[in-house]
Image: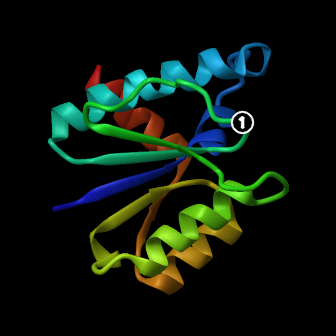
Amino acid sequence: MAEWIVDGNNVMGSRPDGWWRDRRGAQRRLVERLEAFASARDEPVTVIFDGRPHDAGGGRRVAVAFARRSGADAADDDVAALVARHPDPASLTVVTSDAALASRVRVAGGEVVGAGAFLRLLDDAE
């Protein structure tokens, strides 16, 4: 079964829609869109955000996580670790436009889809 891992802040940051004025609200909106996507495709999704943990929704088909540490590349490190320790990394598709993270994912055996292309998939799922 295909699984998706989403670099949440990277996806939010790929569209300048004012998300920075309400980061938590933007995270909740992204999770809602991911729920619709996961339901339509019947594929699990994990989204990892930077920042302090809070209730960003999810739970039905979307697992929501926050980086285990703060600082630069914190969520990227968690995404890369998930791919590296997964028993079947080829079944994973990571959503990010971060070139360094994409390289780490590919080296570990995962696939990568850019944030813009993924947002178009989300648009189609609505």
Q: Quadrant of the C terminus?
A: top left
Please report the residue visible at 69 percent of the width from the left and 44 percent of the height from the top: 50
Choose between 118 and 1: the one closer to the eye.
1
Residue at mark 1: 52
Numbered disc total? 1
Task: Measuring from the top left, give residue 38's x and y in whole percent.
Answer: 25, 37
Instruction: Examine the rendered structure and indicate whether residue 105 appears above or below residue 118.
Output: below
Instruction: Examine the rendered structure and indicate whether residue 91 appears above or below residue 33.
Output: below
Q: Residues within 10 Å of mark 1 (few under 14, many from 20)?
A: few
Query: Which quadrant would residue 59 be assigned to in this image?
Result: top left
Choose between 87 and 10: the one closer to the eye.
87
What type is the residue that disc 1 sits on? Arg
Q: Secondary structure at mark 1?
A: loop
Q: Quadrant of the N terminus?
A: bottom left
Instruction: Examine the rendered structure and indicate whether residue 3 appears above or below residue 27.
Output: below
Please report the residue visible at 46 percent of the width from the left and 59 percent of the height from the top: 94
User: Does residue 10 appear to the left or right of 110 in the view shown?
Assistant: right
